[in-house]
Image: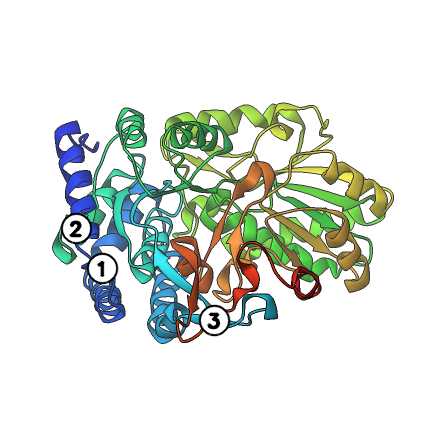
C-alpha cells in the first residue's frame, strides 16, 4: 500500500487551528498535560496490537523486538513523565547577588508553542511518539508526520492519533517529501526531525527562514573499537546483537569495526559464532530478523558487497529484501561503504596496531551519533575523553539509549539537541528568567547621578 498525501489545505487549516488552540492557554495547566499523557498511554495500549501487526507487514519486525524497541520504551517514558512532571515544571528559585537586592529571581519553564515532529521509518512508532511525549509534557501542541516508507504503520498511527486527540491539539499528516517541504514552509515554534544528515540540512535551512529552533536527531558512522584487552566472546555477542537489531537499520547501530590486529582472527570467528547463536545458520528463516525497508535501500546495500572480501554472510534475496549479516574484510577507508552510514546488516572491518591509531581514525572523520569501545576501562575512558560523539558505551552497544535519565542526541554532523526523560521536557520548553522586586523601598544607588558610586562599584 501507499500513503496518500494530506492536502495542503488541510495542513494549513490544522496549523492555524493548533496556533489558536495554544494561544487559548488550554495546554498550560499541569493537570491537563498529565491527563493527555494518560490518554496517550491508553491509546498505545489500545493500538499496540494493530501497530505490532503493521510493523510485521512493513519491516518483518517480530512482536518481541517491537516491544523492546518501540512500545516498551514509550511506556517507560510516559510513566517517567507522569511521575516527575510536576517537579520539572515547578518554578525554580535561584540565588541573587547583592547588587540586585531587594529583588528575587526564579526560572519558569514555559511551552515553546506549536511544534512539528517528523519521524523516520526505522523505528516508526517510537521515534514519532517519543518526542510527542516531551511536547505534551511541556504544554505544546504537535503536528506529527510519520514516514511514508512504512505505510501500514503510518496508517495505524493516524487512526490512533485521530482516535485519541482532537486535531487542534495533536494531529497527524501523511505524505512524501513534497508534503515535508510544504510543512517546513509553515511557521512553528520548534521542529523536531529524525533522519539523515542530508535531510537534516534541508530542515535547518527551511527553519532559518522563520528563525525556528530545531532538534536534529541524525546519524552517521558510529565506530565500534575492539581493543586487544577486550573480552572477545562477550564483545562479539553484544556487537552481533547490536548489528542484528532491526537488521542494522538503527541510527546508533555499530556501523564499522576497528579491531586490534592481534585479535582479528579470533574476533572474526567469535563474531560469526555469535550471529549464528542469535539468528541460526539460516537467518532468513527466523522471525527475529527484520527485512530491508525498500528496494532502493536493498540495492544500495547489496552494492557494498563488492567493496571488500566477504568473510561470512553475503547471502541476499531481493524479493524478500533479505540480506544476511555480512562481514567484509580488506576494506579501504576510501571505499563507498566507508563514506556514508550503512544502515544495514553489513559490517566493514578495519584493523589497527595501536589505540592511538584508532583514535586518530575516528577523530579525522565526522562526529558520530554513538561510539563503542570494548577493552580495558581505563583505556576506554581515555578514548572517550579524546573523541566526540553523541553518546557512547564502554563494553556494550545500543543500551545507552535505554536510560531515560540520560539525554540522547547527536553532536556536529550527527545532530543537535537532545531528548528523553527530563531532557524532553526542557527541549520543548523555554526557560524564562523572572525577577521580582518589592516596592516597599527603593534603593537609590542605581539612579543617576550615581551617588555613592564607589560603593556600587564594590558591590558589582
Can residue 458 be seen at all in this image of the molecule?
Answer: yes
CB-based contact (under 8 Å), mark 2 and mark 3? no
Label 2 with label 1: CB-CB less than 8 Å? yes
- Name which residue lies at 50% across and 52% down: 279
| Quarter of the view holding residue 32 | bottom left
Q: What element carries label 3?
A: strand
On screen, residue 68 versus residue 49, left or right, reads: right
* Residue 230, picture quadrant: bottom right
The picture quadrant where one finds residue 69 is bottom left
Residue 410 vs 77, above or below: the answer is above
Give the structural element (helix, strand or loop) at label 2. helix
Residue topped by disc 1: 27
Residue 402, relative to residue 200: is it above or below?
A: below
> What SS does tag 1 mark?
loop
Say few, some or many: other residues with alpha carbon within 10 Å of mark 1 (under 14 / 14 to 19 / 20 or more): many
Residue 40 in percent (x, y) is at 24, 62
**Of the numbered discs in the image, which one, if any, rests on residue 21?**
2
How far apart marks 1 and 3 lie (CA) works out to 28 Å
Which is more toward the observer, 204 or 49? 204
Q: In the shown orientation, is residue 291 left or right of residue 364?
A: left
Q: Reading the chain from its start, which is encountered first: label 2 or label 3?
A: 2
Q: In this view, does 420 lie above or below 352?
A: below
> Mark 1 near mark 3, Cβ–Cβ under 8 Å?
no
Query: Which residue is tagged 3?
Result: 104
Check the picture and name the quadrant holding the C terminus. bottom right
Query: Which residue is painted at 22% across and 64% down in the image?
Result: 36
- From the viewer's perspective, is residue 87 above or below residue 311? below
Q: Position of residue 285 (x, y in %)?
A: 41, 47
Which residue is nearer to you in this view: 105 or 24? 105
For marks 2 and 3, give the CA distance.
33 Å
Q: Which tag, 1 or 3, sits closer to the chain's start? A: 1
Label for residue 425?
Answer: none
Amino acid at each position: 500500500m501507499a500513503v496518500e498525501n494530506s492536502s495542503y489545505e488541510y495542513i494549513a487549516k490544522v496549523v492555524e487551528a493548533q496556533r489558536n488552540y495554544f494561544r487559548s492557554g488550554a495546554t498550560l495547566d499541569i493537570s491537563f498535560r498529565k491527563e493527555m499523557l494518560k490518554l496517550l498511554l491508553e491509546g498505545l495500549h489500545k493500538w499496540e496490537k494493530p501497530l505490532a501487526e503493521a510493523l510485521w507487514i512493513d519491516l518483518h519486525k517480530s512482536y518481541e523486538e517491537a516491544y523492546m524497541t518501540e512500545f516498551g520504551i514509550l511506556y517507560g517514558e510516559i510513566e517517567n513523565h507522569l511521575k516527575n512532571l510536576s517537579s520539572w515544571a515547578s518554578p525554580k528559585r535561584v540565588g541573587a547577588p547583592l547588587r540586585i537586592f531587594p529583588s528575587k529571581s526564579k526560572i519558569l519553564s514555559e511551552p515553546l508553542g506549536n511544534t512539528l515532529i517528523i519521524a523516520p521509518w526505522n523505528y516508526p512508532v517510537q521515534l514519532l511518539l517519543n518526542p510527542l511525549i516531551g511536547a505534551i509534557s511541556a504544554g505544546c501542541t504537535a503536528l506529527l508526520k510519520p514516514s511514508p516508507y512504512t505505510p501500514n504503520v503510518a496508517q495505524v498511527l493516524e487512526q490512533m492519533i485521530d482516535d485519541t486527540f482532537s486535531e487542534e491539539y495533536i494531529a497527524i499528516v501523511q505524505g512524501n517529501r513534497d508534503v515535508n517541504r510544504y510543512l517546513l514552509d509553515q511557521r512553528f515554534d520548534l521542529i523536531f526531525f529524525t533522519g539523515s544528515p542530508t535531510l537534516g540540512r534541508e530542515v535547518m535551512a527551511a527553519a532559518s527562514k522563520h528563525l525556528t529552533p530545531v532538534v536534529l536527531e541524525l546519524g552517521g558512522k558510529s565506530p565500534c573499537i575492539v581493543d586487544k584487552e577486550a573480552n572477545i566472546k562477550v564483545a562479539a555477542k553484544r556487537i552481533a546483537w547490536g548489528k542484528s537489531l532491526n537488521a542494522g537499520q538503527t541510527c546508533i547501530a555499530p556501523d564499522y569495526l576497528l579491531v586490534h590486529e592481534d585479535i582479528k582472527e579470533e574476533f572474526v570467528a567469535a563474531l560469526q559464532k555469535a550471529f549464528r547463536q542469535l539468528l541460526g545458520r539460516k537467518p532468513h528463516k527466523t522471525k527475529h530478523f527484520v527485512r530491508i525497508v525498500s528496494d532502493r535501500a536493498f540495492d544500495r546495500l547489496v552494492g557494498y558487497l563488492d567493496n571488500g572480501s566477504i568473510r561470512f554472510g553475503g547471502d541476499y534475496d531481493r524479493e524478500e529484501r533479505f540480506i544476511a549479516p555480512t562481514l567484509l574484510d580488506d576494506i579501504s577507508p576510501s571505499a563507498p561503504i566507508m563514506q556514508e552510514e550503512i544502515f544495514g546488516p553489513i559490517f566493514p572491518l578495519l584493523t589497527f596496531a595501536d589505540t592511538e591509531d584508532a583514535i586518530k581514525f575516528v577523530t579525522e572523520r565526522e562526529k558520530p551519533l554513538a561510539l563503542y569501545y570494548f577493552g580495558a576501562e581505563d583505556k576506554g575512558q581515555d578514548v572517550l575523553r579524546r573523541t566526540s560523539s553523541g553518546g557512547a558505551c564502554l563494553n556494550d552497544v545500543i543500551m545507552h539509549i535505554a536510560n531515560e535519565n540520560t539525554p540522547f542526541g547527536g553532536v556536529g554532523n550527527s545532530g543537535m539537541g537532545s531528548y528523553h526523560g527530563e531532557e524532553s521536557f526542557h527541549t520543548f520548553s523555554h526557560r524564562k528568567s523572572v525577577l521580582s522586586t518589592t516596592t516597599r523601598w527603593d534603593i537609590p544607588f542605581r539612579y543617576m547621578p550615581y551617588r555613592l558610586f564607589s560603593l556600587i562599584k564594590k558591590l558589582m
